[in-house]
Image (cartoon, rainbow, N blue to C red):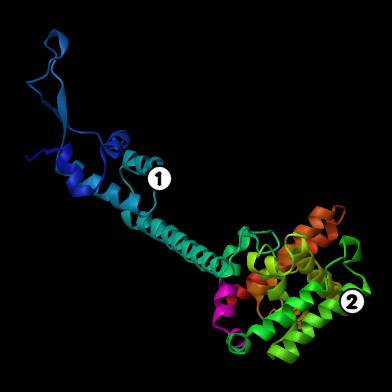
Protein backbone atom coordinates (compact mmCIF):
# COMPACT_ATOMS: atom_id res chain seq x y z
CA UNK A 1 0.00 0.00 0.00
CA UNK A 2 1.37 3.41 -0.94
CA UNK A 3 2.07 5.70 1.97
CA UNK A 4 2.33 9.49 1.77
CA UNK A 5 4.76 11.71 3.62
CA UNK A 6 3.73 15.12 4.94
CA UNK A 7 5.42 16.93 2.04
CA UNK A 8 3.35 14.93 -0.47
CA UNK A 9 0.15 15.58 1.50
CA UNK A 10 0.92 19.31 1.40
CA UNK A 11 1.37 19.17 -2.38
CA UNK A 12 -1.84 17.21 -2.97
CA UNK A 13 -4.11 19.14 -0.60
CA UNK A 14 -2.61 22.60 -0.21
CA UNK A 15 -2.79 22.18 3.56
CA UNK A 16 0.10 23.35 5.71
CA UNK A 17 1.97 21.34 8.34
CA UNK A 18 0.12 23.37 10.95
CA UNK A 19 -3.22 22.34 9.39
CA UNK A 20 -2.19 18.67 9.44
CA UNK A 21 -1.20 18.97 13.09
CA UNK A 22 -4.61 20.49 13.95
CA UNK A 23 -6.50 17.79 12.00
CA UNK A 24 -4.52 14.96 13.65
CA UNK A 25 -7.27 14.97 16.27
CA UNK A 26 -9.64 13.36 13.75
CA UNK A 27 -7.39 12.34 10.82
CA UNK A 28 -4.21 10.95 12.40
CA UNK A 29 -1.27 9.56 10.41
CA UNK A 30 -1.34 5.77 10.28
CA UNK A 31 2.30 5.31 11.29
CA UNK A 32 5.69 6.89 11.44
CA UNK A 33 8.59 6.15 9.12
CA UNK A 34 11.76 5.46 11.08
CA UNK A 35 14.43 8.11 10.78
CA UNK A 36 17.69 6.14 11.01
CA UNK A 37 19.68 9.35 11.16
CA UNK A 38 18.11 10.46 14.41
CA UNK A 39 20.42 11.43 17.25
CA UNK A 40 17.75 10.75 19.84
CA UNK A 41 19.11 9.69 23.20
CA UNK A 42 18.92 6.07 24.32
CA UNK A 43 18.64 4.77 20.80
CA UNK A 44 15.04 6.01 20.51
CA UNK A 45 14.14 6.66 16.89
CA UNK A 46 12.09 9.64 15.77
CA UNK A 47 9.97 9.29 12.64
CA UNK A 48 8.19 11.03 9.79
CA UNK A 49 4.39 11.00 9.73
CA UNK A 50 2.87 8.81 7.05
CA UNK A 51 -0.69 8.76 5.72
CA UNK A 52 -2.43 6.01 3.76
CA UNK A 53 -4.81 6.48 0.80
CA UNK A 54 -7.84 6.88 3.08
CA UNK A 55 -6.05 9.55 5.10
CA UNK A 56 -5.12 11.42 1.93
CA UNK A 57 -8.74 11.35 0.72
CA UNK A 58 -10.02 12.61 4.07
CA UNK A 59 -7.47 15.42 4.08
CA UNK A 60 -8.45 16.40 0.52
CA UNK A 61 -12.04 16.65 1.72
CA UNK A 62 -10.93 18.59 4.81
CA UNK A 63 -9.03 21.01 2.56
CA UNK A 64 -12.16 21.61 0.50
CA UNK A 65 -14.26 22.14 3.63
CA UNK A 66 -11.63 24.62 4.83
CA UNK A 67 -11.77 26.58 1.55
CA UNK A 68 -15.56 26.74 1.91
CA UNK A 69 -15.12 28.38 5.30
CA UNK A 70 -15.39 25.50 7.79
CA UNK A 71 -13.47 26.06 11.02
CA UNK A 72 -10.85 23.54 12.23
CA UNK A 73 -13.18 22.68 15.12
CA UNK A 74 -16.04 21.92 12.73
CA UNK A 75 -13.80 19.81 10.46
CA UNK A 76 -12.51 17.79 13.39
CA UNK A 77 -16.06 17.25 14.64
CA UNK A 78 -17.12 15.92 11.24
CA UNK A 79 -14.26 13.48 10.79
CA UNK A 80 -14.32 12.38 14.43
CA UNK A 81 -18.00 11.51 13.93
CA UNK A 82 -17.05 9.72 10.73
CA UNK A 83 -20.48 8.86 9.41
CA UNK A 84 -21.65 12.24 8.06
CA UNK A 85 -23.59 13.06 4.91
CA UNK A 86 -21.12 14.90 2.67
CA UNK A 87 -23.90 16.43 0.59
CA UNK A 88 -25.54 17.94 3.68
CA UNK A 89 -22.21 19.39 4.75
CA UNK A 90 -21.58 20.79 1.26
CA UNK A 91 -25.07 22.35 1.20
CA UNK A 92 -24.43 23.98 4.57
CA UNK A 93 -20.99 25.29 3.65
CA UNK A 94 -22.00 26.45 0.16
CA UNK A 95 -24.90 28.42 1.66
CA UNK A 96 -22.58 30.06 4.20
CA UNK A 97 -19.93 30.73 1.54
CA UNK A 98 -22.60 32.37 -0.64
CA UNK A 99 -23.65 34.57 2.27
CA UNK A 100 -20.03 35.60 2.87
CA UNK A 101 -19.56 36.31 -0.82
CA UNK A 102 -22.67 38.52 -0.80
CA UNK A 103 -21.36 40.29 2.28
CA UNK A 104 -18.01 40.83 0.55
CA UNK A 105 -19.80 42.23 -2.52
CA UNK A 106 -21.79 44.55 -0.26
CA UNK A 107 -18.68 45.76 1.56
CA UNK A 108 -16.93 46.42 -1.77
CA UNK A 109 -19.94 48.41 -3.03
CA UNK A 110 -20.07 50.55 0.11
CA UNK A 111 -16.27 50.99 0.19
CA UNK A 112 -16.23 52.16 -3.43
CA UNK A 113 -18.91 54.76 -2.69
CA UNK A 114 -17.08 55.98 0.41
CA UNK A 115 -13.91 56.24 -1.66
CA UNK A 116 -15.68 58.25 -4.37
CA UNK A 117 -17.05 60.59 -1.69
CA UNK A 118 -13.57 61.03 -0.17
CA UNK A 119 -14.91 60.12 3.25
CA UNK A 120 -12.38 60.54 6.03
CA UNK A 121 -14.63 58.88 8.63
CA UNK A 122 -17.81 56.85 8.74
CA UNK A 123 -20.60 58.13 10.94
CA UNK A 124 -23.58 56.30 12.41
CA UNK A 125 -25.73 58.75 10.47
CA UNK A 126 -24.38 57.30 7.23
CA UNK A 127 -25.36 53.70 7.79
CA UNK A 128 -25.88 50.88 10.25
CA UNK A 129 -23.54 47.92 9.79
CA UNK A 130 -26.36 45.63 10.88
CA UNK A 131 -28.15 46.52 7.65
CA UNK A 132 -25.11 46.49 5.36
CA UNK A 133 -26.87 44.50 2.65
CA UNK A 134 -29.80 46.93 2.58
CA UNK A 135 -27.42 49.87 2.28
CA UNK A 136 -25.42 48.20 -0.50
CA UNK A 137 -28.57 47.39 -2.45
CA UNK A 138 -29.72 50.98 -2.05
CA UNK A 139 -26.36 52.31 -3.26
CA UNK A 140 -26.40 49.97 -6.27
CA UNK A 141 -29.84 51.26 -7.22
CA UNK A 142 -28.76 54.85 -6.65
CA UNK A 143 -25.65 54.52 -8.79
CA UNK A 144 -27.66 53.09 -11.66
CA UNK A 145 -30.76 55.25 -11.28
CA UNK A 146 -32.01 57.76 -13.84
CA UNK A 147 -31.94 60.45 -11.13
CA UNK A 148 -28.24 59.91 -10.49
CA UNK A 149 -27.57 60.16 -14.22
CA UNK A 150 -29.58 63.41 -14.32
CA UNK A 151 -27.51 64.92 -11.53
CA UNK A 152 -24.26 63.91 -13.23
CA UNK A 153 -25.41 65.48 -16.50
CA UNK A 154 -26.42 68.79 -14.85
CA UNK A 155 -23.56 69.03 -12.37
CA UNK A 156 -21.09 71.84 -13.08
CA UNK A 157 -19.15 74.44 -11.11
CA UNK A 158 -21.99 77.02 -10.85
CA UNK A 159 -24.38 74.27 -9.66
CA UNK A 160 -21.91 73.12 -7.04
CA UNK A 161 -21.34 76.70 -5.86
CA UNK A 162 -25.10 77.23 -5.51
CA UNK A 163 -25.35 74.13 -3.33
CA UNK A 164 -22.36 75.21 -1.21
CA UNK A 165 -24.03 78.57 -0.66
CA UNK A 166 -27.13 76.81 0.69
CA UNK A 167 -24.86 74.80 3.00
CA UNK A 168 -23.31 78.02 4.33
CA UNK A 169 -26.81 79.21 5.24
CA UNK A 170 -26.87 76.60 8.03
CA UNK A 171 -23.77 78.05 9.71
CA UNK A 172 -24.21 79.78 13.06
CA UNK A 173 -27.09 77.63 14.29
CA UNK A 174 -26.90 75.18 17.20
CA UNK A 175 -28.64 71.93 18.14
CA UNK A 176 -31.32 74.00 19.88
CA UNK A 177 -32.25 75.49 16.47
CA UNK A 178 -32.71 72.16 14.66
CA UNK A 179 -36.49 72.46 14.52
CA UNK A 180 -36.67 76.25 14.19
CA UNK A 181 -38.41 77.98 11.30
CA UNK A 182 -35.13 79.43 10.00
CA UNK A 183 -33.37 76.08 9.82
CA UNK A 184 -36.44 74.50 8.25
CA UNK A 185 -36.39 77.27 5.63
CA UNK A 186 -32.80 76.30 4.75
CA UNK A 187 -33.84 72.67 4.33
CA UNK A 188 -36.66 73.85 2.06
CA UNK A 189 -34.05 75.67 -0.05
CA UNK A 190 -32.19 72.39 -0.48
CA UNK A 191 -35.40 70.70 -1.54
CA UNK A 192 -36.22 73.42 -4.09
CA UNK A 193 -32.67 73.20 -5.42
CA UNK A 194 -33.26 69.49 -6.10
CA UNK A 195 -36.55 70.06 -7.90
CA UNK A 196 -35.83 73.31 -9.77
CA UNK A 197 -32.11 73.00 -10.57
CA UNK A 198 -31.47 69.24 -10.72
CA UNK A 199 -35.00 68.13 -11.70
CA UNK A 200 -34.99 65.23 -9.22
CA UNK A 201 -37.27 64.09 -6.40
CA UNK A 202 -36.91 66.48 -3.45
CA UNK A 203 -37.43 63.96 -0.67
CA UNK A 204 -35.01 61.49 -2.17
CA UNK A 205 -32.41 64.21 -2.71
CA UNK A 206 -32.67 65.29 0.93
CA UNK A 207 -32.17 61.71 2.12
CA UNK A 208 -29.11 61.41 -0.11
CA UNK A 209 -27.74 64.69 1.23
CA UNK A 210 -28.26 63.64 4.84
CA UNK A 211 -26.32 60.44 4.12
CA UNK A 212 -23.50 61.87 2.02
CA UNK A 213 -22.83 65.06 3.98
CA UNK A 214 -21.70 63.31 7.12
CA UNK A 215 -17.91 63.35 7.46
CA UNK A 216 -17.38 63.97 3.76
CA UNK A 217 -14.04 65.70 3.53
CA UNK A 218 -14.68 67.43 0.20
CA UNK A 219 -17.91 69.07 1.41
CA UNK A 220 -16.56 69.79 4.88
CA UNK A 221 -13.66 71.80 3.46
CA UNK A 222 -16.00 73.83 1.27
CA UNK A 223 -18.26 74.74 4.16
CA UNK A 224 -15.53 76.13 6.34
CA UNK A 225 -14.39 72.99 8.10
CA UNK A 226 -11.67 74.90 9.94
CA UNK A 227 -14.17 77.13 11.72
CA UNK A 228 -17.02 74.68 12.26
CA UNK A 229 -16.10 70.98 12.06
CA UNK A 230 -19.61 69.87 13.02
CA UNK A 231 -21.49 71.70 10.28
CA UNK A 232 -21.96 68.72 7.91
CA UNK A 233 -23.39 66.66 10.77
CA UNK A 234 -25.65 69.56 11.75
CA UNK A 235 -27.04 69.82 8.22
CA UNK A 236 -27.67 66.05 8.15
CA UNK A 237 -29.49 66.30 11.50
CA UNK A 238 -31.51 69.29 10.28
CA UNK A 239 -32.63 67.39 7.18
CA UNK A 240 -33.62 64.38 9.25
CA UNK A 241 -35.54 66.55 11.77
CA UNK A 242 -37.38 68.26 8.89
CA UNK A 243 -38.29 64.97 7.23
CA UNK A 244 -39.36 63.12 10.35
CA UNK A 245 -41.44 66.00 11.75
CA UNK A 246 -43.42 66.41 8.52
CA UNK A 247 -43.69 62.65 8.20
CA UNK A 248 -45.21 62.23 11.68
CA UNK A 249 -47.49 65.28 11.30
CA UNK A 250 -48.97 63.97 8.07
CA UNK A 251 -48.88 60.29 8.99
CA UNK A 252 -50.28 60.29 12.52
CA UNK A 253 -53.41 58.35 11.52
CA UNK A 254 -51.44 55.91 9.35
CA UNK A 255 -49.08 55.19 12.24
CA UNK A 256 -52.00 54.66 14.63
CA UNK A 257 -53.59 52.18 12.21
CA UNK A 258 -50.32 50.28 11.95
CA UNK A 259 -50.07 50.22 15.74
CA UNK A 260 -53.38 48.35 15.83
CA UNK A 261 -51.82 45.64 13.64
CA UNK A 262 -49.12 44.73 16.16
CA UNK A 263 -49.41 41.02 16.91
CA UNK A 264 -51.16 40.22 13.62
CA UNK A 265 -49.45 37.91 11.14
CA UNK A 266 -47.56 39.87 8.50
CA UNK A 267 -49.33 37.95 5.73
CA UNK A 268 -52.77 39.33 6.64
CA UNK A 269 -54.28 41.68 4.06
CA UNK A 270 -54.89 44.44 6.60
CA UNK A 271 -51.22 44.55 7.55
CA UNK A 272 -50.17 44.82 3.91
CA UNK A 273 -52.74 47.56 3.23
CA UNK A 274 -51.60 49.66 6.20
CA UNK A 275 -47.96 49.08 5.33
CA UNK A 276 -48.54 50.31 1.78
CA UNK A 277 -49.99 53.56 3.17
CA UNK A 278 -46.95 53.87 5.41
CA UNK A 279 -44.65 53.33 2.42
CA UNK A 280 -46.41 56.09 0.49
CA UNK A 281 -45.56 58.49 3.31
CA UNK A 282 -41.94 57.33 3.38
CA UNK A 283 -41.77 57.93 -0.35
CA UNK A 284 -43.26 61.39 -0.04
CA UNK A 285 -40.97 62.66 2.72
CA UNK A 286 -37.85 60.52 2.38
CA UNK A 287 -38.01 59.46 -1.27
CA UNK A 288 -37.88 55.77 -0.25
CA UNK A 289 -39.55 53.56 -2.80
CA UNK A 290 -39.18 50.02 -1.55
CA UNK A 291 -39.15 47.95 1.62
CA UNK A 292 -35.35 47.64 1.85
CA UNK A 293 -34.96 51.43 1.89
CA UNK A 294 -37.89 51.78 4.27
CA UNK A 295 -36.39 49.27 6.67
CA UNK A 296 -33.20 51.33 6.74
CA UNK A 297 -34.92 54.48 8.05
CA UNK A 298 -37.16 52.58 10.48
CA UNK A 299 -34.10 50.83 11.95
CA UNK A 300 -32.54 54.26 12.43
CA UNK A 301 -35.68 55.52 14.17
CA UNK A 302 -35.75 52.48 16.43
CA UNK A 303 -32.17 53.18 17.54
CA UNK A 304 -33.08 56.80 18.21
CA UNK A 305 -36.09 55.80 20.31
CA UNK A 306 -33.95 53.37 22.31
CA UNK A 307 -31.39 56.11 22.89
CA UNK A 308 -34.07 58.56 24.06
CA UNK A 309 -35.40 56.06 26.63
CA UNK A 310 -38.94 55.56 28.01
CA UNK A 311 -40.22 54.85 24.48
CA UNK A 312 -40.89 51.11 24.66
CA UNK A 313 -44.14 51.39 22.69
CA UNK A 314 -42.43 53.26 19.86
CA UNK A 315 -39.57 50.74 19.77
CA UNK A 316 -42.10 47.89 19.68
CA UNK A 317 -43.89 49.54 16.74
CA UNK A 318 -40.63 50.06 14.84
CA UNK A 319 -39.76 46.38 15.43
CA UNK A 320 -43.11 45.31 14.01
CA UNK A 321 -42.83 47.60 10.98
CA UNK A 322 -39.28 46.38 10.27
CA UNK A 323 -40.50 42.79 10.45
CA UNK A 324 -43.38 43.49 8.07
CA UNK A 325 -41.09 45.29 5.61
CA UNK A 326 -38.62 42.43 5.66
CA UNK A 327 -41.45 39.93 5.12
CA UNK A 328 -42.88 41.75 2.09
CA UNK A 329 -39.42 42.57 0.78
CA UNK A 330 -38.66 38.83 0.74
CA UNK A 331 -41.97 37.61 -0.73
CA UNK A 332 -42.17 40.09 -3.59
Dominant secondary-structure state across the stretch colored magenta: helix
**Magenta stretch bounds:** 137-148
Please state which of residues 190 and 294 is positioned toward the viewer in this rendering.
190
Q: Quadrant of the C terminus?
A: bottom right
Which element is circle 2 on?
Answer: helix
Instruction: Between label 1 and label 2, give the one nearer the viewer.
Output: 2
Cα distance between the residues tagged 1 and 2: 52 Å
Which residue shows up at 79% across the image and 70% down it?
240
Q: Is residue 289 magenta?
A: no
Q: Which residue is mark 2?
A: 249
Which residue shows up at 66% across the image and 73% down it?
293
Q: Does residue 162 appear to the left or right of 16 in the view shown?
A: right
Number of other residues with Cα within 10 Å of mark 2, as a class: few under 14, some 14 to 19, many 20 or more:
few
Which residue shows up at 79% across the image and 72% down it?
168
Q: Which residue is mark 1?
A: 71
Q: Looking at the picture, does residue 240 appear above or below residue 16?
A: below
Amino acid sequence: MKMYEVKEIEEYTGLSRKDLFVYEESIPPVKRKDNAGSNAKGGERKGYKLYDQEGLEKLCMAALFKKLGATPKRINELFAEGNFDKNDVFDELILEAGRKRQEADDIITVANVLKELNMEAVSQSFFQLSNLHGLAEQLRRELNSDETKKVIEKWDKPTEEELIEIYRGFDGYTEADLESDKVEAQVEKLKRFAVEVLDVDGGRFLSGQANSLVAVDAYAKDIEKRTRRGLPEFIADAIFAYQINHFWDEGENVVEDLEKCIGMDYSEKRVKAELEKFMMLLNRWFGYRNYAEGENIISKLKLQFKKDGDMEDEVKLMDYICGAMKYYGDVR
